[in-house]
Image: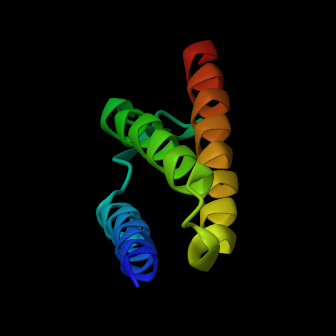
Amino acid sequence: MAEITKEAKEEDKNERKMVEVDLVWKGLSFSVSKYLDKGYAIGSPDEIRDQLEEHIMVLGGVGASKYARSVKKKVATWEHDLNLIFDVIELWMMVQRRW
């Protein structure tokens, strides 16, 4: 009985972490402005980069947990998406530096 209770608590903890990640990313956005006649530029992505690093670490911890069975698919999706966002930011900033 104690093992079942422990497993349920750990699964709930992992699910809450996933909800937190989801809520944070629903509220984040880039500041975008027109840049000369070349297109659009994003403002400093430092806040978003900080969140990326933090949440990639959180997802790594959740994914490594033996109690992550109920959220494994969500973790994999979020890890893919956050790594993609990280790569896109890096490329976008590289392009902007060349302007």
Side of 11 relative to 75 (left or right): left
- The percent coordinates of residue 60 (x first, y second) are 56, 45
Side of 99 relative to 52 (left or right): right
Quadrant in which residue 74 is drawn: bottom right
The residue at the point 65 percent across, 43 percent down is 83
Q: Is residue 54 above or below residue 98?
A: below
Q: Is residue 29 above or below residue 56?
A: below
Color encoding of the figure: rainbow
Residue pushed farthest front?
Answer: 1
Quadrant in which residue 91 is drawn: top right
Side of 91 relative to 8 (left or right): right
- Foreground: 36 or 11? 11
Q: In this view, does 72 lie above or below 83?
A: below
Q: How many tags in the picture? A: 0
Q: Quadrant of the N terminus?
A: bottom left
Q: Quadrant of the C terminus?
A: top right
Side of 89 relative to 52 (left or right): right
The residue at the point 59 percent across, 79 percent down is 70
Q: Is residue 29 above or below residue 41?
A: below
The residue at the point 61 percent across, 28 percent down is 90
- The percent coordinates of residue 18 (x first, y second) are 43, 68
- The percent coordinates of residue 32 (x first, y second) are 39, 47
- The percent coordinates of residue 44 (x first, y second) are 35, 30
Residue pushed farthest top?
Answer: 98
- Foreground: 68 or 57? 68
